[in-house]
Amino acid sequence: MESPKVHKILYGGDYNPEQWPEEVWQEDMHLLPKAHIDTVTINVFSWAKLQPSEEEYDFSELDKIMEMLKKNHFKVCLATSTAAHPAWMAKRYPDILRVDFEGRKRKFGMRHNSCPNSPTYKKYSVKLAGELAKRYKDFDHIVAWHISNEYGGECYCDNCGNAFRGWLKEKYKTIDNVNKAWNTSFWGHTFYDWDEIVPPNSLSEHFGYNRTTFQGISLDYARFNSDSLLECYKDEYKVIKEITPHIPITTNLMGLYKPLDYQKWAPYLDFISWDNYPSNDDPYSRTAMSHDLMRGLKQGMPFALMEQTPSVTNWLPYNALKRPGVIRLWSYQAVAHGADTVMFFQMRRSIGACEKYHGAVIDHAGHENTRVFRECAELGQELELLGDKLLGSRVKSDIAILFDWNNWWAIEYSAGPSADLKYQSQIHHYYQALFNENYNVDLISVNDDFDQYKLIIAPALYMVKEGVDQKLEKFVKNGGTFLTTFFSGYVDEHDLVQVGGYPGKLSELLGIWVEETDALPVDQWNEIIEQEQSYSCNLLFDIIHLKGAEAIASYGKDFYAGTPVVTKNTFGQGAAWYVGSNPEERYLSKLLKTICHDAGIKPILPASEGIEVSRRVKGESQYTFILNHNDLPKKLVLEQPYRNLLNNKEYANGEEIVLSPKDVLILENL
Ligand code: GLA
Ligand code: ZN
């Protein structure tokens, strides 16, 4: 977050003094500085306190909290509290309650629960944001606004139905265009009047959240729902911006969160912030990928790590502790991938309701003599010593992976070819192969600039939006390398198939025609044979005809044995690769290393098991992060002289170092 008020990596997180008596606030003011915490996110869920009735606002408690934080030199990320509406509001104005996917009208309860097209929600959320901005505009310890919290979910109520029809009218102008876009001549669905269109849920087109009889309408509803929530955010943004134009505004995103098209949201956030809660079995490459996706939303601008747990979550079936050193390791992982803040949920463990066993800096024990507190304090001290050194530095990459939310929705709404085809897994498969070899990778949208990259990878680019094929052709013609896979080039933005053979508009670039695709259960493998070496592949098996491309590898089995599975087409100055099945990691790693080598892309350091490497640069300075995810020490040989920013130790060229388990180095080039 670029701000004249920020001179170091901000450290802190969600703080809920409103859940505690004031004596405890005093203890917090004493304890949090001991952990070197300098920033707190407050007022995330206080709407019911701030507005006890329709006519009345009461800021007395928040005033006290703001004054106390100011006096104690804390920076504040001030939330607007609009992620959970008050009970009285739900009782008086039921339009604020959502209708769920099953068509049930919700009652008051939970959070993230307001209908985004409810006139009541729109009126009172914006009003509250405005009141807060007016009241606290002169508090110069506010470093950012945090609108609502983790926008998400869907609503299918009548207000949303009406708004959906309005959204469609604006997009399609005529009902005829809608009929064409959704191919409604199938199963006699032709619409003659806008009012005949209803939201697609399990009462209408769906037979399961991801299973729909009409992809066109479901896709448009996903877009509409994401837009509806974005409108709520934008309305609050606008009123706050008018009053405090100098304070940056964000909302906390959730990484690989499917329902919201964050690439469409990003331009309206002054900086990206997100909440990182990996599951126990998530590989750390997936966390790295999520950071890279979030960084890519604003073309590489540093982002804020808004939340992570210091120890446990409360919502997994098994809430494993973060092992010693892991708080630090994962915090620096975020920084290595472009974060300029390290924040937690939460400062103090609450005593009631569902998050009372969620990790916090201050535990139920109530004092600082805990492992978690000590680890947080050590990290806080280290971040203080780092100062502004890394702020504003950027991750630079020659490789981009294309990621597209509409494509994600379309692939997973698709009836066929395989229930096991998951967009995220495909993206991660390619990402991981590069990550393991220590290449920095950007995840970008199809609308971003391609020209700064040497290699663009687009796993399962099923939906090719208007102009993307030409952009890719230009990129390759000018010397770029492109790689795509099975289930690419099939449809346009409406999920309508491009006739003339797969991969549709990408056929010429790739120099192939895919005549058929075999989909088998994932435990049924075929072989990829390349130069007499055999590798395995599963999931989908494209049967490919060469139309100018050369076969790099072929299938080993089945009735398509001997036909191409991996192809390369020279196109202008560059090359376009196609991978027609799902290769085992060993093959992918070998293939991508060759492709990178041919494209003149070098890894940051040689690969080493369990060691993550990433690099940020600022001007002439390079900061190489080395993270040991192993439970054992690891030896590394450095290939140039460095200084470790975390302890100022210098290393000579060729020096062997031993990295302790979970340890981190941030090496500055000398
Ligand atoms: C989310 C929310 C927080 C809290 C944490 C718990 O990220 O934003 O309010 O519920 O989850 O993990
Ligand atoms: Zn609704």
Image: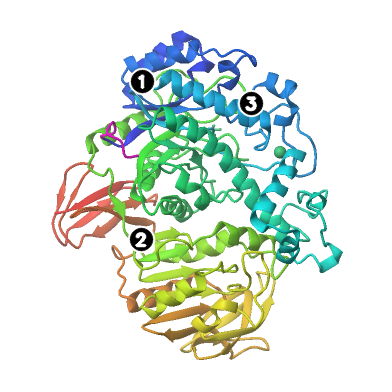
Kindly tell me whether residue 363 is visible in this rendering.
no
Q: Position of residue 439 (x, y in %)?
A: 35, 63
Q: Nearer the viewer, residue 455 or 188?
A: 188
Q: Quadrant location of ligand 1?
A: top right
Which residue lies under the disc numbered 2?
440
Q: Neighbour class for label 3 at 10 Å: few (<14), some, many (≥20)?
A: many
In the drawing, does residue 251 fall left or right of residue 438? Answer: right
Q: Position of residue 640 (x, y in %)?
A: 17, 61
Q: Quadrant of residue 471?
A: bottom left
- Which amino acid does the dot numbered 1 rest on? Phe
Q: Neighbour class for label 2 at 10 Å: few (<14), some, many (≥20)?
A: many
Tell me the quarter of the image containing the N terminus.
Answer: top left
In the image, which is nearer the foreground, mark 1 or mark 3? 1
Q: Which label's residue is closer to the chain start, 1 or 3?
A: 3
Q: Quadrant of residue 489?
A: bottom right
Q: Quadrant of residue 507?
A: bottom right
- Which amino acid does the dot numbered 3 rest on? His
Cα–Cα gap, marks 2 and 3: 42 Å
- Which amino acid does the dot numbered 2 rest on? Asn
Residue 139 shows which numbered tag? 1
Label 1, secondary structure: give it: loop
Q: Neighbour class for label 1 at 10 Å: few (<14), some, many (≥20)?
A: some
Q: Which label's residue is closer to the chain start, 2 or 3?
A: 3
Label 3, secondary structure: give it: loop
Which residue lies under the disc numbered 3?
85
In the image, which is nearer the foreground, mark 2 or mark 3? 3
Q: Against 322, is 16 above or below?
A: above
Magenta stretch? 1-7
